[in-house]
Each structure stands twice: as C-alpha cells, then as structure tokens.
Image: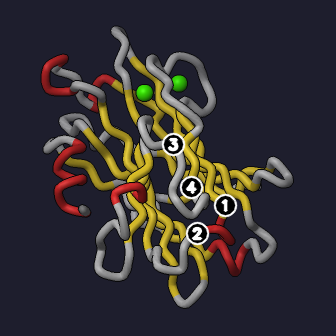
C-alpha cells in the first residue's frame, strides 16, 4: 500500500525503494465551476540553490532537462477528470550529479488576469509511481489551505549523500511563476 504523507513529511526513496529508477510524479486536481488551467513546472537546483543552466527549468515550453533526467509529458488545459492531470517523469540515474534539489511547482496560468486561485480547486495531490511496476509509492494530498495562492510547490526531491528523498513541502505563494524563475536563475 502506498505511503500517505502529510505536509512537511519526508520519505527516503532510496532506502525504501532501492531498485527505483524511473519515477512518475503524477499531479492532479479537480476544478469547481469554471475551467482553471494549471501548469506543472520543475526547477532543478544545484548546491547553490540555482539552475545550473536555464534548460534545467522544465515546463510546457521546455519538456526535457539537458541531462534527460526530468521530462514533462505535456500541457493539460482543463484539469477535468480524475487521475493525474499533468505528469513529470524522473529518471533518477540520469539526473546530473550537480542537481541537489528538484522542485515540483503547480501554477495557475494567467492567474492574475483571470482572477483564479487555488481556492477554486479541490482534491489536489502529488503521487509517486514506480514506472517499472506501475506501483504507487507515496501520495501527498494537499489540504484546502492554499485558497489565496496562485502557485504551490507540491513537493520536492532532494539528494542527500547520493540518496533521494521526497519532501511533501506544500509551499504556496501568490507572486507568480516568474518570481520563482527570478529567484533560481
Ligand atoms: Ca496546463
Ligand atoms: Ca482532474
């Protein structure tokens, strides 16, 4: 059975799943009422907390990191339907040794002009699936606390001495995705 993490919870993936190589990070949400377009983005950071190069910011316009370690499976515009709405594939052995942390952010497209926020969503989650066996390893269901946010870090992968950890970070903000880009570039 999959492990259920609460906000702030962590799991040592390498210890728990020593054979794990390809991991699907599935992101889901349900929209109440009108359509909200959410976009998953990934920031791959080095020991200084920066992108080693711009291309380590993976999003709908840059679907693959230069090391091949992170791949975005494409844009979903509506979030309609149960199951994963956007997906990120991580191939752990391919990830550049330079990369220490991998932040998975979900942001609302044109949140400001459309006046959208996370309060219009429910049942948001991130789950990790072992691609090889199609088995869910863990799941973090985000609460309703992000109502006024326009982007939320759903989780992060952290490399500590060669071991990958997943952190159910759940950090929300309403300064826009660009503020992340400015911070990590
Ligand atoms: Ca989208
Ligand atoms: Ca959905």
Disc 2 to disc 4, how far (Cα)? Answer: 7 Å
Q: Is residue 57 left or right of residue 30?
A: left
* Residue that protrudes farthest toward the top in the picture: 34
Marks 1 & 2, CB-CB < 8 Å contact: yes
Indicate the quadrant where residue 59 lies: top left
Marks 1 & 3, CB-CB < 8 Å contact: no
Marks 2 & 4, CB-CB < 8 Å contact: yes
Towards the viewer: 9 or 76: 76
Rendered residue at 24%/43% (across/down): 177
Towards the viewer: 54 or 110: 54
Disc 4 secondary structure class: strand
Instruction: Please say if 72 is above or below 43.
Output: above
Residue on which disc 2 sits: 95
Instruction: Please say if 98 is above or below 132.
Output: below
Query: First in sequence: mark 3 or mark 4?
Result: 3
Residue on which disc 1 sits: 91
Towards the viewer: 9 or 41: 41
Query: First in sequence: mark 2 or mark 3?
Result: 3
Q: Residues within 10 Å of mark 4 (few under 14, many from 20)?
A: many
Query: First in sequence: mark 2 or mark 4?
Result: 4
Disc 1 to disc 3, how far (Cα)? Answer: 14 Å
Residue on which disc 4 sits: 70
Indicate the quadrant where residue 87 lies: top right
């Amino acid at each position: 059975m999959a492990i259920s993490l609460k906000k702030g919870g962590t799991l040592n993936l390498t210890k728990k799943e020593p054979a794990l190589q390809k991991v699907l990070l599935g992101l889901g949400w349900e929209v109440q009422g009108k359509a909200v377009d959410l976009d998953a983005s990934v920031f791959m950071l080095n020991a200084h907390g920066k992108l080693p190069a711009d291309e380590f910011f993976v999003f709908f316009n840059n679907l693959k990191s230069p090391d091949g370690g992170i791949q975005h499976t494409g844009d979903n515009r509506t979030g309609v339907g149960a199951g994963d709405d956007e997906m990120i594939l991580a191939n752990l052995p391919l990830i550049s040794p330079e990369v220490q942390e991998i932040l998975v952010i979900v942001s609302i497209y044109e949140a400001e002009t459309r006046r959208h926020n996370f309060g219009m969503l429910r049942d948001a989650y991130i789950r990790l699936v072992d691609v090889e066996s199609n088995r869910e390893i863990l799941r973090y269901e985000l609460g309703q606390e992000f109502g006024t946010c326009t982007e939320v870090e759903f989780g992060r992968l952290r490399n500590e001495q060669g071991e990958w950890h997943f952190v159910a970070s759940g950090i929300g903000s309403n300064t826009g995705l660009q503020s992340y880009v400015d911070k990590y570039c």
